[in-house]
Amino acid sequence: MQHALFTAKFFPPLTKRVDAGHSRLYTLYSRPLPGLERRSMIDRGLFVATQAIRRQLHAMPCELYLVRLIHHATGRAFPGERVWTASQVSQPATVRFLRIRNREGCDVDLQPFAGDRNAGYILVDLDHAEPSVLDAMRRNGHEPCVVLKSSPRRWQAWIRVSAVPLQPAVATAIGGYLARTYGGDPASIDWRHRRFRGRLGFGSG
Protein backbone atom coordinates (compact mmCIF):
# COMPACT_ATOMS: atom_id res chain seq x y z
CA MET A 1 0.00 0.00 0.00
CA GLN A 2 2.83 2.37 0.74
CA HIS A 3 4.02 2.29 -2.86
CA ALA A 4 0.73 3.87 -3.95
CA LEU A 5 1.94 7.14 -2.43
CA PHE A 6 4.72 7.38 -4.97
CA THR A 7 3.01 7.41 -8.32
CA ALA A 8 4.77 7.99 -11.60
CA LYS A 9 3.96 11.69 -11.59
CA PHE A 10 6.53 12.25 -8.84
CA PHE A 11 9.35 10.92 -10.98
CA PRO A 12 11.05 12.73 -13.85
CA PRO A 13 11.71 10.75 -17.05
CA LEU A 14 14.43 8.18 -16.70
CA THR A 15 17.78 9.68 -17.63
CA LYS A 16 20.92 7.95 -18.81
CA ARG A 17 24.14 8.25 -16.88
CA VAL A 18 27.33 6.84 -18.40
CA ASP A 19 30.10 5.72 -16.05
CA ALA A 20 33.54 5.11 -17.53
CA GLY A 21 35.25 3.70 -14.50
CA HIS A 22 36.29 0.54 -16.37
CA SER A 23 37.34 -0.34 -19.84
CA ARG A 24 33.73 -0.95 -20.76
CA LEU A 25 31.06 1.76 -20.60
CA TYR A 26 28.08 0.95 -18.42
CA THR A 27 24.81 2.74 -19.13
CA LEU A 28 22.91 3.27 -15.89
CA TYR A 29 19.42 4.61 -15.23
CA SER A 30 18.73 6.69 -12.19
CA ARG A 31 15.75 8.36 -10.59
CA PRO A 32 15.06 9.79 -7.10
CA LEU A 33 14.32 7.28 -4.39
CA PRO A 34 10.72 7.51 -3.15
CA GLY A 35 11.80 8.31 0.41
CA LEU A 36 14.02 11.16 -0.73
CA GLU A 37 11.27 12.56 -2.96
CA ARG A 38 8.79 12.57 -0.10
CA ARG A 39 11.36 14.18 2.22
CA SER A 40 11.88 16.91 -0.36
CA MET A 41 8.13 17.58 -0.48
CA ILE A 42 7.97 17.82 3.34
CA ASP A 43 10.93 20.19 3.49
CA ARG A 44 9.41 22.37 0.77
CA GLY A 45 6.11 22.59 2.67
CA LEU A 46 7.93 23.50 5.87
CA PHE A 47 9.91 26.19 4.06
CA VAL A 48 6.78 27.76 2.56
CA ALA A 49 4.97 27.70 5.92
CA THR A 50 7.92 29.26 7.73
CA GLN A 51 8.20 32.07 5.18
CA ALA A 52 4.46 32.79 5.39
CA ILE A 53 4.56 33.00 9.18
CA ARG A 54 7.61 35.25 9.11
CA ARG A 55 5.89 37.61 6.68
CA GLN A 56 2.88 37.87 8.98
CA LEU A 57 5.03 38.49 12.06
CA HIS A 58 7.04 41.11 10.18
CA ALA A 59 3.82 42.95 9.29
CA MET A 60 2.64 42.79 12.93
CA PRO A 61 5.75 43.63 14.98
CA CYS A 62 5.48 42.93 18.69
CA GLU A 63 7.85 41.80 21.41
CA LEU A 64 5.75 38.72 22.25
CA TYR A 65 3.01 36.63 20.63
CA LEU A 66 0.35 34.48 22.25
CA VAL A 67 -0.14 31.11 20.55
CA ARG A 68 -3.02 28.76 21.32
CA LEU A 69 -4.45 25.67 19.64
CA ILE A 70 -8.21 25.62 19.00
CA HIS A 71 -10.00 22.43 18.01
CA HIS A 72 -11.72 23.33 14.76
CA ALA A 73 -14.78 21.10 15.20
CA THR A 74 -15.62 22.03 18.80
CA GLY A 75 -14.08 25.50 19.10
CA ARG A 76 -12.45 24.49 22.36
CA ALA A 77 -8.94 25.59 23.23
CA PHE A 78 -6.35 23.00 24.15
CA PRO A 79 -4.95 23.40 27.68
CA GLY A 80 -2.04 25.77 27.97
CA GLU A 81 -1.07 29.00 26.26
CA ARG A 82 2.36 29.69 24.83
CA VAL A 83 3.96 33.15 24.80
CA TRP A 84 6.81 33.25 22.32
CA THR A 85 9.02 35.81 20.64
CA ALA A 86 8.87 36.19 16.86
CA SER A 87 12.11 34.24 16.60
CA GLN A 88 10.69 31.36 18.61
CA VAL A 89 7.40 31.25 16.65
CA SER A 90 9.20 31.12 13.31
CA GLN A 91 11.78 28.47 14.22
CA PRO A 92 11.47 25.38 11.99
CA ALA A 93 10.85 23.12 14.99
CA THR A 94 7.95 25.34 16.13
CA VAL A 95 6.47 25.58 12.63
CA ARG A 96 6.73 21.82 12.24
CA PHE A 97 4.85 21.33 15.54
CA LEU A 98 2.10 23.78 14.54
CA ARG A 99 1.68 22.18 11.11
CA ILE A 100 1.27 18.74 12.69
CA ARG A 101 -1.44 20.05 15.05
CA ASN A 102 -3.00 21.91 12.11
CA ARG A 103 -3.29 18.71 10.09
CA GLU A 104 -4.86 17.03 13.12
CA GLY A 105 -7.75 19.52 12.99
CA CYS A 106 -6.55 22.43 15.10
CA ASP A 107 -6.75 26.09 14.23
CA VAL A 108 -3.78 28.17 15.31
CA ASP A 109 -4.62 31.16 17.49
CA LEU A 110 -1.84 33.71 16.98
CA GLN A 111 -1.94 37.28 18.27
CA PRO A 112 0.41 40.01 19.47
CA PHE A 113 0.66 39.84 23.26
CA ALA A 114 1.00 42.57 25.87
CA GLY A 115 -0.03 40.89 29.09
CA ASP A 116 -3.34 42.19 30.49
CA ARG A 117 -3.56 44.90 27.81
CA ASN A 118 -4.18 44.92 24.07
CA ALA A 119 -0.94 45.08 22.07
CA GLY A 120 -2.30 47.82 19.79
CA TYR A 121 -3.82 45.56 17.11
CA ILE A 122 -7.52 45.06 16.37
CA LEU A 123 -8.89 42.18 14.32
CA VAL A 124 -12.01 42.88 12.23
CA ASP A 125 -13.75 39.63 11.30
CA LEU A 126 -15.47 40.26 7.96
CA ASP A 127 -18.08 37.61 7.14
CA HIS A 128 -19.58 37.64 3.63
CA ALA A 129 -17.86 40.93 2.87
CA GLU A 130 -17.26 42.38 -0.55
CA PRO A 131 -13.64 43.02 -1.58
CA SER A 132 -14.47 46.74 -1.78
CA VAL A 133 -14.58 46.89 2.04
CA LEU A 134 -10.78 46.70 2.10
CA ASP A 135 -10.60 49.72 -0.22
CA ALA A 136 -12.95 51.59 2.12
CA MET A 137 -10.66 50.80 5.05
CA ARG A 138 -7.68 52.24 3.21
CA ARG A 139 -9.56 55.39 2.22
CA ASN A 140 -10.57 55.98 5.84
CA GLY A 141 -7.05 55.56 7.18
CA HIS A 142 -7.72 52.09 8.59
CA GLU A 143 -5.51 50.14 6.21
CA PRO A 144 -4.96 46.60 7.52
CA CYS A 145 -1.40 45.49 8.16
CA VAL A 146 -2.41 41.87 7.56
CA VAL A 147 -5.40 40.46 5.65
CA LEU A 148 -6.21 36.75 5.93
CA LYS A 149 -8.70 35.14 3.58
CA SER A 150 -10.11 32.27 5.61
CA SER A 151 -12.80 31.27 3.10
CA PRO A 152 -14.55 32.73 0.03
CA ARG A 153 -15.87 36.22 0.88
CA ARG A 154 -14.52 36.00 4.41
CA TRP A 155 -11.55 38.09 5.48
CA GLN A 156 -9.86 38.73 8.77
CA ALA A 157 -8.22 42.14 8.78
CA TRP A 158 -5.66 43.12 11.39
CA ILE A 159 -5.45 46.88 11.92
CA ARG A 160 -2.77 48.52 14.02
CA VAL A 161 -4.47 51.31 15.94
CA SER A 162 -1.75 52.17 18.47
CA ALA A 163 2.01 51.95 18.83
CA VAL A 164 1.61 51.39 22.58
CA PRO A 165 -0.54 48.87 24.47
CA LEU A 166 -4.17 49.81 25.13
CA GLN A 167 -6.42 49.33 28.11
CA PRO A 168 -9.00 46.56 27.54
CA ALA A 169 -12.01 48.90 27.57
CA VAL A 170 -10.42 51.17 24.98
CA ALA A 171 -9.48 48.27 22.71
CA THR A 172 -12.99 46.79 22.94
CA ALA A 173 -14.56 50.15 22.09
CA ILE A 174 -12.31 50.55 19.05
CA GLY A 175 -13.08 46.99 17.96
CA GLY A 176 -16.81 47.68 18.19
CA TYR A 177 -16.51 50.86 16.15
CA LEU A 178 -14.51 49.15 13.39
CA ALA A 179 -16.92 46.20 13.31
CA ARG A 180 -19.94 48.50 12.94
CA THR A 181 -18.23 50.67 10.34
CA TYR A 182 -17.13 47.82 8.07
CA GLY A 183 -19.76 45.18 8.75
CA GLY A 184 -17.59 43.01 10.95
CA ASP A 185 -18.83 40.26 13.25
CA PRO A 186 -20.27 42.02 16.34
CA ALA A 187 -19.85 38.83 18.38
CA SER A 188 -16.07 39.11 18.12
CA ILE A 189 -15.42 42.65 19.34
CA ASP A 190 -14.05 41.78 22.77
CA TRP A 191 -10.34 42.57 22.76
CA ARG A 192 -9.39 39.20 24.24
CA HIS A 193 -11.25 37.48 21.40
CA ARG A 194 -8.90 38.95 18.80
CA ARG A 195 -7.39 36.02 17.07
CA PHE A 196 -6.21 34.57 13.81
CA ARG A 197 -7.99 31.28 13.30
CA GLY A 198 -6.48 29.71 10.27
CA ARG A 199 -5.13 26.44 9.02
CA LEU A 200 -1.41 26.56 8.43
CA GLY A 201 -1.73 24.35 5.37
CA PHE A 202 1.06 26.09 3.46
CA GLY A 203 2.44 23.64 0.94
CA SER A 204 2.32 19.88 0.99
CA GLY A 205 3.67 17.50 3.57
Image: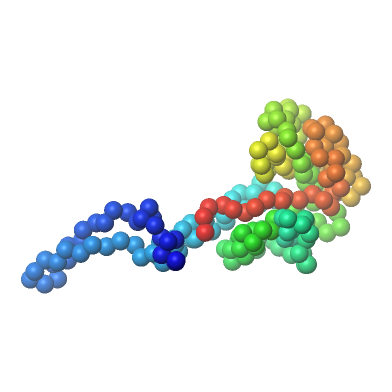
Quarter of the image with the N terminus is bottom left
Q: Number of callouts in the render?
A: 0
**Residue 64 visible in the shown view:** no
Residue furthest to the right in view is 169
Q: Quadrant of residue 155?
A: top right
Residue 135, placed above or below residue 83: above
Is residue 69 shown left or right of residue 29? right
**Residue at 61%, 49% in the rendered image:** 55
Work out which residue is located at the far left of the displayed protein and give it. 23
Confirm whether residue 102 shows in the render: yes
Q: Nearer the viewer, residue 155 or 118?
A: 155
Q: Residue 108 at x, y = what percent?
A: 69, 56
Q: Is residue 2 left or right of residue 153?
A: left
Q: Residue at x 86, y 57 (%)?
A: 116
Q: Position of residue 199 (x, y in %)?
A: 65, 52
The single residue placed furthest to the front in the displayed view is 1
Can you give x and y, in whole percent of width and height, for residue 101 in the image? 65, 62
Image point 62% across, 54% down: which residue?
200
* Residue 145, x across and y down, in percent: 69, 41
Q: Residue at x 84, y 52 (%)?
A: 192
- The quadrant where residue 94 appears: bottom right
Q: Quadrant of residue 143?
A: top right
Asked whether 90 or 72 is in front, the reply is: 72
Left or right: where does residue 94 sit relative to residue 167? left
- The coloring applied to the image is rainbow
Identify whether 180 is placed above or below 44. Answer: above
